[in-house]
Image: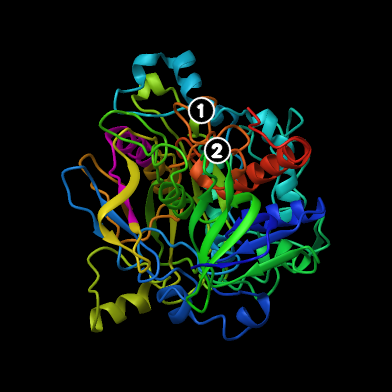
Amino acid sequence: MARKEKKRDVVIVGLGWTGSILGMELCNEGLDVLALERGGDRDTVPDFQYPAIADELKYGVRYGFMQKPRNSTVTVRRSESETALPYRHLGSFLPGDGVGGAGMHWNGHTFRPMAEEFQLKSYVEQNFGKDLISDEMAIQDWGISYQELEPYFDRFEKVAGIAGQAGNLKGEIREGGNPFEAPRSNDYPMPPLPQTVDSNKFADAARKMGYHPYPRPSGVASKAYTNPYGMQLGPCNFCGFCERFGCYQYSKSSPQTCILDALKRKENFEYRTNAEVLKIELAADGKTAKGVTYMDANGEEVYQPADMVILAAYQLHNVHLMLLSGIGQAYNPATGDGVIGKNYAYQTNGGTALFFKDIDFNPFVGNGSNGHVIDDFAINRIDFGAEGFIGGSYISSGTFNGQPIRSMRLPGGTPKWGAGWKSAIKEWYGHSMAIGSHGSNMSYHTNHLDLDPTYKDKYGRPLMRMTFNWKSNDIRMTQFMKSKIEPLAESMNPDIMQSSFKKEGAMYDVRPYQTTHNVGGAIMGSDPKSSALNKFLQTWDVHNVFVMGANAFPQNIQYNPTGTVGALAYWAVEAIRKDYLPNPRPLV
């Protein structure tokens, strides 16, 4: 029999960005809050101390801060006709492990979606016609507008200490920012960081072609900064160890740097690590949650009662817990019935590498969000009807990985080992740059998540099964980006140029890293028949369960998701504080 703990006002599952935000805000409301984190504790000291943290083999190559597939994984297939097999070695995506989650080891790219992305289905229908949306596509509006979320983007950017240059400040287009962005109420809390050689070279070439480069919005501090919680950030020293690493400098925006040390001081907050939540426990009528059952660090099953349950784990884990707990009807792609697991989407990327014999790019100098970006081919800049696809991409260049093992870009045809490989390293290390396309990915009826009928985890629960493959719409979009990037690259006169973009017929491959931008599966919307969550991220079926994270995205945006995830968390907790707590009930 499970050990029963004292009842809490709120139990939060996961202690990354969203768990930290909800914990802080609800503690400030006077609630008794408990967070359960499946991984171990992570803190700047001692976990990120220099020089131990700058161990590229341990953290960059062997994934020291990532979840181990032996403890937590999914099965993967590309179609209903394939048998799903377990994802046994991390490659395509890298969920974080422990306190801070993926917010600990991310790069810090912090964008706001374009206003049109929140009403994508309506935008397409009104401007290009319903016929452009194919029968296989499952795109939806979010049930919320950019204008509603704008104050909460602003809030997250202030807490995270984002460095950048506003392009549209209260309707005024500003030089040096993104002229195509939706209006913002305030500038970024910090100015942009200095740029590296490749970033400036790309920006110069883009301007000459009539494009509009702007510095990438960065969760990396450009100066000393104190956020609204009293947490202090120090300016980045461009060490190049952001991606896959914790920051020893207190420069990278992360839950550790921006929230957790303040949250841990709250007398009404407690967190438990190595606590694997097995299930959300429902009342007899199934309309409310009573708490959660979890396995503690000693292997003992524990029942934790709570008045409110907030899922704030990684996107995949939130959806998995909802399926295991019977919250909402599981999606059936054959009939279209159900909502839990539908609209899983990813990211559509490509890029061109450029090699210059006479330019030294100093690749050991960089930060996780370094670079210039152009949005000239973003979602609100493309005639979808003329081009024959729905979607868009930002295009960028900059050094954000200064790690020598993982920064060995070499021309095609170079031997993988031996004397030829060494000779190529000597000739080309430090003499290359890349221009990348980071694009949207539409949702489709066949791309979904469900429970695997064969494979189980160490607790005997079915693993979650991912069914995903690339579709023609997204291939056309990325090929369009290739047609824009290659002339830009050619204008820079490289000695060697080589591109890598998905072609028609490309199949999803879990082996190479792509992004940790998994979205969908428990999406938000305005109709319980087509969404799992209402506009406040409250489950339609169980009103005291709220679900944070990128699982709420009905399809993937063209940008990195963290800024939107943070804004949605502040939006949801505001509704909880002001509307739900005084009168617990369905908010819509």
| Residue farthest bottom in this picture | 51
Q: Secondary structure at mark 1?
A: helix
Q: Quadrant of the C terminus?
A: top right
Amino acid identity at mark 2? Lys
Q: Is residue 271 magenta?
A: no
Q: Horizontal placement of 27 versus 282: left or right? A: right
Residue 167 appears anywhere in the view: yes
What stretch of residues is rendered in magenta? Answer: 463-483
- Vertical placement of residue 388 versus 229, above or below: above
43 or 449, nearer to the observer: 449
Above or below: residue 214 compared with residue 261: above
Query: Closer to the N terminus: mark 2 or mark 1?
Result: 2
Q: Position of residue 371 (x, y in %)?
A: 57, 55
Residue closer to the observer: 274 or 467:
274
Q: Amino acid at mark 1?
A: Arg
Is the Cβ of the residue at disc 2 closer than 8 Å to that at disc 1?
no
In the foreground, 312 or 484? 312
Task: Measure the alpha-carbon separation of dots 2 and 1.
Answer: 44 Å
According to the picture, the residue beneath numbered tag 2 turns out to be 287
Q: Which mark is residue 381?
A: 1
| Residue visible at 69% across and 30% down in the picture | 148
Residue 110 visible: no
